[in-house]
Amino acid sequence: MKNSANIKFLSLSENESFARMCVASFIAPLNPTIEEIADIKTAVSEAVTNAIVHGYPEKIGQIEMRLKYENKTINIEIMDDGVGIKDVEKARRPFYTTCSDGTRSGMGFTVMESFMDQTKVVSAVEEGTRVVLIKKLGGKK
């Protein structure tokens, strides 16, 4: 079975929980385990929070979330048109953060990678970022 949905929302912190609920509702027909739902919601939360905090640090922008699944494989894309990431490889390192106020741990990508089977990041400065999260339900990492 194949299904898809596209959702757009503003880069407001309250929309992080909206994104989590959308993805949980979207995958419900696949009968995921509670652990699988929690893993996916956590990864989505990290990706959306990154877009809100880092993609649009000084303004409100738009975030797009594309959801699709085929059989038991879920593909989630989270995109922003924000400031982009200068060095994606460096940004994916544990504890790396661009926040100088100490409020961010720099573990967002590490968390995404630990809960999903695949995590892809494509970004260009001043063009935005696309994070792709892929997970097969019922499978081991």
Image: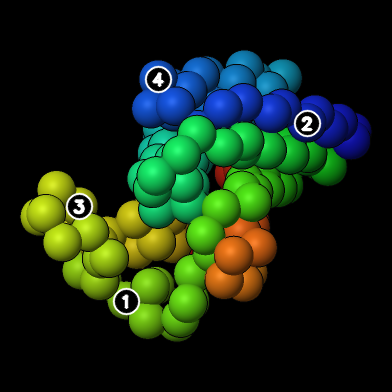
Q: How many marks?
A: 4
Circle nearer the N terminus (2, 3): 2
The one of 124 and 106 positioned closer to us in this rendering: 124
Residue labelled with disc 2: 6
Rendered image: mark on residue 14 = 4
Q: Give the colour scheme of this rendering.
A: rainbow
Q: What amino acid is labelled 3 in the image?
A: Arg
Q: How crowded is mark 3: few (under 14 residues within 10 Å), some or many (20 or more)?
A: some
Circle nearer the N terminus (1, 2): 2
Circle nearer the N terminus (1, 3): 1
Residue labelled with disc 1: 93
**Residue at figure coordinates x 64%, y 51% from the top left:** 81
Residue labelled with disc 3: 104
Rendered image: mark on residue 102 = none
**Residue at figure coordinates x 89%, y 35% from the top left:** 2
Q: What amino acid is labelled 1 in the image?
A: Arg
Mark 1 → mark 2, Cα distance in angstroms: 29 Å
